[in-house]
Image: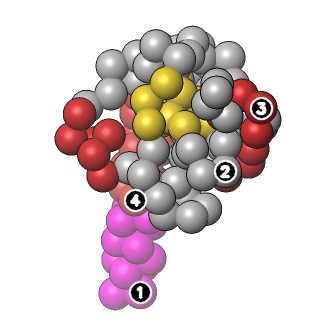
Amino acid sequence: MRRLIKILLFLAIAYLVVKYARKLLESADMSAANIPEQDVEPYDEAPLGGEVSPDLLEILVCPEDKGSLELVDEGRFLLNPRNGYRYPIRSGVPVMLIDEGRKYRESPADTAEPS
């Protein structure tokens, strides 16, 4: 008789655990289903320019030579005058990747001052 009670108690507890687990999984599925989908624009397609904090501009340096940068092209790029790398600013966020700076690099003729 004791053994039967133990088995029934075990089955009741197992049933409640499974029922609770299913309830949790269903609520997780429902909360994920309620998240609206947002179109994420790739950073390569984001518009150039945007407002950048002056405090941020003061501390940003070229990731390659750690030198200072200049804001150019109406606030669309940060220029390293030593190597010609131009780091794009996309939607107000400077893209400080060396490959991006190389991609938009100015030729030496572009950076030379007229005599």
Residue displayed at 42% across by 52% down: 68
Q: CA distance from mark 2 to mark 3?
A: 12 Å
Q: Please give the residue where the numbered disc 3 appears in the rendered image.
A: 109
Q: CA distance from mark 3 to mark 1?
A: 92 Å
Residue displayed at 77% across by 32% down: 109
The quadrant where residue 30 appears:
top left
Residue displayed at 57% across by 12% down: 47
Instruction: Check disc 2 and give the amino acid type.
Output: Asn
Q: Earlier in the sequence, mark 1 or mark 2?
A: 1
Does the segment drawn in magenta span residue 81?
A: no
Does the segment drawn in magenta span residue 3?
A: yes
Q: CA distance from mark 2 to mark 4?
A: 65 Å
Question: Answer yes or no: do the residues labelled 3 and 1 have beta carbons within 8 Å?
Answer: no
Q: Is 72 placed left or right of 99 in the picture? A: left
Viewer can see residue 54:
yes
- Crowd band around label 1 with a 10 angstrom C-alpha radius: few (<14), some (14–19), many (20+): few
Number of the front mark, 3 or 1? 3
In this picture, is 6 found above or below 80? below
The magenta stretch spans which residues? 1-15
**Secondary structure under badge 4?**
helix
Task: Look at the image and tell me in which quarter the N terminus lies.
Answer: bottom left
Q: Please give the residue where the numbered disc 2 appears in the rendered image.
A: 83
Q: Which mark is residue 3?
A: 1
Q: Earlier in the sequence, mark 2 or mark 3?
A: 2
**Secondary structure under badge 1?**
helix
**Secondary structure under badge 3?**
helix
**Residue 78 point in image, percent of width and height:** 50, 35
Instruction: Check disc 1 and give the amino acid type.
Output: Arg
- Crowd band around label 3 with a 10 angstrom C-alpha radius: few (<14), some (14–19), many (20+): few
